[in-house]
Image (spheres, helix red, strand yellow):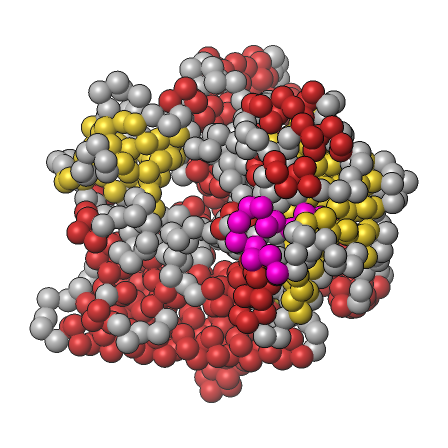
């Protein structure tokens, strides 16, 4: 009986332990700081070596004793660990070696590719994923390579070329995959690696006009065409009356490009962002609906001579197929693959009608997911979904049904009891998952949604029981070969749109109530996360039933939950010292300065017409990761898009106490935001003080400076105790020579990103900075920082850093004057980060 439940014979290890060690081996490779590229070529040999511990244990096993059995299982566990490590490291090494070599950065290649992702027809600068069909003449790329491309300033007549499934011939300028690196911010480089993207680039139209080419027809290509057709049907002119087409596309296809900014923020604050992720809830719902529908004819088969056993097989295979079809329609993201695998295993167990150990299935699913994608260990969705399943298994597995709900109960009372029991179980499951995932929410998102429990209580049933079935009905109806289906499908979509409006209205009410109670999304600073994580973990262990019911410390540990929430609601201890972070925003500038419990943001990075916004992609996530709720001072040095591009977004995302900019630019912000306290920075303005930090304004000279040119930039001299920091914006050499009152400084953020003539000899000889930082894009067309600028800084003894090579740079002054410098690309040890030096 023990072996039937997945346990090993006496003296051995539980069989599920082999899955655990295999998962551990798969995960270890992804955590390495470096993976040699030769591993994938030696994988067969390494696999043979990895099996040696098990083989050795078999050879020396002299008798069937408990000790020899333990030796055998010990060798098997070590072999499982090593095999997982070799398989994972070989796969990852092969991915890294397949990337475009750095020597071909910026090369123009002519080749044929197939568009494999849905393209938004109204995007100003469409971005899409493609697969190489016919490589370039030099064979730098290979057939089947995946690339991510953009088409900037696309003409209207060429938009018809950009549809999923189309094959194009074009000239493309490529570069190796690379993204910005900032603490607590989405890892674009790692995401490209998980997607097997070997290069990124953009289409060149000057030398060759892109045109349609020929490529092999395949099931995947037809599926991509179907996804594009469904997307255009949702967002097309026939459904122009839909107010929430972006949400519909996200729920059905997993495409969030058109989800409104305010809707995304509302879902995040109420802890319901998971509703838009194609994951377990959506896949399980499809499987359940298919099981129910296919089971109806199956129940009719019960009266036929073939017997009743065929019906559940038909329902099971229908459930697996329907869930798989939906996952493919949604683009088969990792979360959908994970959910389909676990749903399929659950359905297969139901079909077999055997009692099965849920934990064995759990670990087997984890093994398969990690085998397919070892980098899942860096995906919060992996941990959230598997931990949610683990919580439910630990909380409810093996529990007996309450009395009065069995077959012997009165039918009327039994139906009432079953409904009551189901409702209570739903509440308990929601409470268990919400409480159990608190530590992960704190670790990954630096905060918790205190309104999430209430919001999910009505949002999950509404989405599961009404919105998603109606959405599926509209798609199925549209696929039927009848004349009336277009009208019926449109009506189903309209009902879905109305239900989504009801959902968002309810979430707004919950969010408004939480805001009035000063709760809602509770951000926790990164350096204070340890205590809340530990308390949440202990509370989850106690309350979820992982401890015996009469465990003596259970009431005391439960009280810690209330203490934790109270701790989150009150002001935290004021941070001592000064921390200045020069964020990695590419060719632009954005800095965050924190001291005495205050947060200052200096410039907001770049915003492109195609939709990328540094404030949305980098600054906001970084601030939330650091537990920032309010920006006390926002400085926009001048009106260039690489400094002021993200200001509007940031003003919408956070409460801002005060904004400073050059006179003319400040007047524009005052007109645009009437309720905002706006001031002008100029050399006659009074100093600002935040605890031990003071800011002296050195430029512009006039309060009426328009702020439109580089020479109009706000120049600030920050003084913290004995440390001085010079922030010159984009001023030129002539303005540098006019700055007065300067002595030696500890940190200089180089003017104009390190252009050829900025940071002149005159400025450097006066300031002799201990550190010089260049905020620039990696191998950008402007080629900043210029070698002359770097040479001048080094000539005065300055240590030189660039965000293009180091990622975000953090300068942390302790109260005793000690300074620590941290480079994000070095501190976040990832094997796909490449380190260079100036």
Return the residue nearer the eye: 364 or 499: 499
Q: Position of residue 785 (x, y in %)?
A: 55, 30
Magenta-tinted stretch: 704-716
Q: In percent of the image, x 35 and y 39: which residue is there?
A: 148
Residue 629 in the image, given as x and y percentages of width and height: 68, 62
Q: Position of residue 253 (x, y in %)?
A: 33, 57
At horizontal 50% and vertical 60% (from top left) the residue drawn is 274
User: Measuring 21% from the left and 32% from the top, which residue is drawn there?
Assistant: 207
Place residue 219 in its image quadrant.
top left
| Residue 328 seen in render | no
Can residue 716 be seen here? The reply is yes
Say which quadrant the N terminus sits in. top right
Q: Where's the C terminus, which quadrant?
A: top right
SS majority, magenta = loop
Tally of numbered tags: 0
Taking the view exactly as shown, the residue that stands out farthest to the right is 816
The answer to if 713 sits in the magenta stretch is: yes
Q: Quadrant of residue 524?
A: bottom right
Q: Eyeballing the image, is 615 above or below 654?
A: above
Q: Is residue 20 left or right of residue 134?
A: right
Left of 110 or right of it: where is 173?
A: right
Q: Is residue 415 above or below residue 791?
A: below
Of residues 171 and 536, which is closer to you in this image? Answer: 171
The answer to which image quadrant residue 204 occupies is: top left
Residue at 60% from the left image edge and 57% from the top image edge:
705
Please name whichever residue, 583 or 92, is drawn nearer the observer in this view of the structure.
583
The percent position of residue 135, horizontal first and vertical second, equals 24, 26
Q: Is 795 part of what is drawn in magenta?
A: no
Q: Is residue 64 left or right of residue 142?
A: right
């Amino acid at each position: 009986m023990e072996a039937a439940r997945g346990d090993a014979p006496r003296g051995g290890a539980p069989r599920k332990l082999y899955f655990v060690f295999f998962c551990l081996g798969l995960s270890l490779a992804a955590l390495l700081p470096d993976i040699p590229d030769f591993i994938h070529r030696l994988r067969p040999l390494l696999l043979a070596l990895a099996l040696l511990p098990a083989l050795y244990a078999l050879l020396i096993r002299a008798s069937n004793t408990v000790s020899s059995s333990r030796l055998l299982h010990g060798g098997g566990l070590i072999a499982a660990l090593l095999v997982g490590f070799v398989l994972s490291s070989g796969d990852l090494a092969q991915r890294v070696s397949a990337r475009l070599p750095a020597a071909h950065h910026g090369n123009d290649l002519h080749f044929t590719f197939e568009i494999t992702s849905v393209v938004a027809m109204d995007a100003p600068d469409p971005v899409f994923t493609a697969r190489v069909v016919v490589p370039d003449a030099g064979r730098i790329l290979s057939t089947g390579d995946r690339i991510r491309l953009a088409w900037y300033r696309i003409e209207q007549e060429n938009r018809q070329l950009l549809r999923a499934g189309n094959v194009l011939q074009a000239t493309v300028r490529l570069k190796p995959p690379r993204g910005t690196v900032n603490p607590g911010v989405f890892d674009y480089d790692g995401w490209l690696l998980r997607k097997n993207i070997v290069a990124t680039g953009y289409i060149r139209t000057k030398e060759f006009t892109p045109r349609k080419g020929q490529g092999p027809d395949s099931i995947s290509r037809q599926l991509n065409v179907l996804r594009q057709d469904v997307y255009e049907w949702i967002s097309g002119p026939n459904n122009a009356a839909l107010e929430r087409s972006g949400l519909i596309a996200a729920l059905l296809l997993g495409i969030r490009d058109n989800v409104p900014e305010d809707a995304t923020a509302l879902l995040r604050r109420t802890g319901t962002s998971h509703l838009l992720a194609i994951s377990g809830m959506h896949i399980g719902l499809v499987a359940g609906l298919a099981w129910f529908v296919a089971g109806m004819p199956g129940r009719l088969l019960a009266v036929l001579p073939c017997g009743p056993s065929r019906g559940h097989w038909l329902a099971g295979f229908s459930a697996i197929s329907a869930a798989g079809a939906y996952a493919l329609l949604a683009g088969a993201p990792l979360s959908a693959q994970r959910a389909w695998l676990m749903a399929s295993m659950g359905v297969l167990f139901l079909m077999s009608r055997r009692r099965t150990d849920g934990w064995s299935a759990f670990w087997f699913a984890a093994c398969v997911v990690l085998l397919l994608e070892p980098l899942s260990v860096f995906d919060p969705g992996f941990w959230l979904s598997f931990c949610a399943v683990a919580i439910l298994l630990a909380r409810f597995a093996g529990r007996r049904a309450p009395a009065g709900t069995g077959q012997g109960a009165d039918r009327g009372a039994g139906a009432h009891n079953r409904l009551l029991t189901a409702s209570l179980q739903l509440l308990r499951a929601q409470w268990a998952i919400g409480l159990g995932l608190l530590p992960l929410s704190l670790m990954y998102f630096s905060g918790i949604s205190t309104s999430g429990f209430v919001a999910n209580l009505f949002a999950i049933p509404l989405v599961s029981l009404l919105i998603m079935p109606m959405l599926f009905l509209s798609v199925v109806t549209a696929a039927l070969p009848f004349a009336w289906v277009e009208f019926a499908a449109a009506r189903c979509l309209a009902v879905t749109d109305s239900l989504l409006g009801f959902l968002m209205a309810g979430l707004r009410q919950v969010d408004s109530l939480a805001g009035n109670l000063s709760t809602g999304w509770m951000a926790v600073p990164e350096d204070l996360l340890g205590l809340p994580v530990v308390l949440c973990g202990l509370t989850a262990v106690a309350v979820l039933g992982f401890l015996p019911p009469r465990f003596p410390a259970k009431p005391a540990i439960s009280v810690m939950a209330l203490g934790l929430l109270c701790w989150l609601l009150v002001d935290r201890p004021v941070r001592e010292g000064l921390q200045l972070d020069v964020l990695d925003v590419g060719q632009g500038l954005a800095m965050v300065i924190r001291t005495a419990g205050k947060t200052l943001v200096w410039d907001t990075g770049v915003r492109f017409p195609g939709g990328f916004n540094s404030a949305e992609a980098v600054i906001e996530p970084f601030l939330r990761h650091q537990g920032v709720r309010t920006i006390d001072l926002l400085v926009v040095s001048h009106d260039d898009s690489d400094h002021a591009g993200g200001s509007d977004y940031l003003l919408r995302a956070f409460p801002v106490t005060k904004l400073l900019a050059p006179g003319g630019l400040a007047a524009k912000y005052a007109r645009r935001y009437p309720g905002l306290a706006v001031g002008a920075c100029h050399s006659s303005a009074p100093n600002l003080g935040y605890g031990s930090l003071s800011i002296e304004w050195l430029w512009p000279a006039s309060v009426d400076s328009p702020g439109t040119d580089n020479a109009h930039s706000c120049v600030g001299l920050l003084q913290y105790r004995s440390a001085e920091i010079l922030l010159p914006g984009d001023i030129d050499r002539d303005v540098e020579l006019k700055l007065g009152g300067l002595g030696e400084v500890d940190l200089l953020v180089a003017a104009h990103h390190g252009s050829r003539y900025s940071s002149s000899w005159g400025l450097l000889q006066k300031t002799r900075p201990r550190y010089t930082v260049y905020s620039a894009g990696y191998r950008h067309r402007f080629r900043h920082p210029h070698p002359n600028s770097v040479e001048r800084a080094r000539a005065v003894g300055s240590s030189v850093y660039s965000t293009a090579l180091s990622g975000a740079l953090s300068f942390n002054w302790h109260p005793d004057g000690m300074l620590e410098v941290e480079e994000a690309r070095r501190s976040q040890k990832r094997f796909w980060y490449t380190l260079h030096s100036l």
